[in-house]
Image: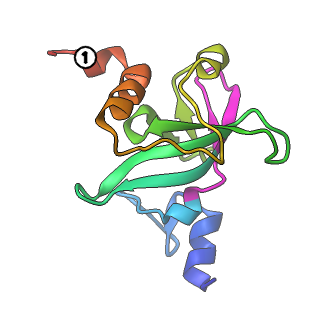
Amino acid sequence: MSDMATQSKRSHDTVDGMQAESLLLSASTMTGDEVCNRQDEKLGKIQDIMLDTVEGKIRYVVLASGGFLGLGDRLFAVPWKALTQDRENHRFILDVDVDQLKSAPGFDKDQWPNMADPTWNSTIDSFYARPSDHAGS
């Protein structure tokens, strides 16, 4: 791993030692980051990032939750827009409680859904939609 990639891995809020107004992170930098809710409860860790190559943006973060040492984890596709970066604590915030996440549409590590399926997308986006996401709809 290059020195730049190593430095980037260590710090989310600096790039080349300078404060970043607009922060760019590599996908591998975010992989393994903790995801908590607003009550500071741990929900899981980012396992993967799904890119929309047509629109050129992050579509989903794959959240691993519930297992022990990576065994028995349940996976959840969380829309990127549902997460907020907590730079100070080097993690992401998802505004759901633990019980809500347990009832979220999830999948097994060996049976990923077709994330290009519009019906599946709609189900996931609706589950994690914030009330403000529906304003003006």
Residue beneath the point at 60% across and 22% down: 101
Q: Nearer the viewer, residue 116 or 91?
A: 116
Give the quarter of the figure containing the C terminus.
top left
- Residue sitting farthest toward the left: 136
Residue farthest toward the right in the current orientation of the protein: 68
Residue located at (33% from left, 30% from top): 119
**Percent position (x, y) of residue 93?**
55, 34
In this view, the residue in front, 119 or 15, is 119
What residue is shown with label 1?
134
Name the foreground residue: 5 vs 47.
47
The local crowd at label 1, few if under 14, some if 14 to 19, many if 20 or more residues have their Cα within 10 Å, is few
Type of amino acid under label 1: His
* Magenta span of residues: 30-45
Displayed quadrant of residue 106: top right
Q: Residue at x 51, y 23 (%)?
A: 95
Task: Estimate the x, y position of residue 56 in percent, counting from the top left.
Answer: 27, 59
Rendered location of residue 118, percent (x, y): 29, 35
Q: Is residue 7 left or right of residue 126?
A: right
Q: How many marks?
A: 1
Horizontal side of residue 137 vs 89, given as left or right: left
Q: Residue at x 75, y 32 (%)?
A: 66
Q: Is residue 71 left or right of residue 106?
A: right
Looking at the rendered structure, the secondary structure element under dot 1 is: helix
The N terminus lies in which quarter of the figure? Answer: bottom right
Q: Is residue 41 above or below residue 93?
A: above
Q: Residue furthest bottom?
A: 2
Return the residue nearer the eye: 107 or 5: 107
Q: How is the image coloured?
A: rainbow
Answer whether residue 44 is magenta in the image.
yes
Q: Position of residue 72 (x, y in %)?
A: 79, 39
Answer whether residue 39 is magenta in the image.
yes
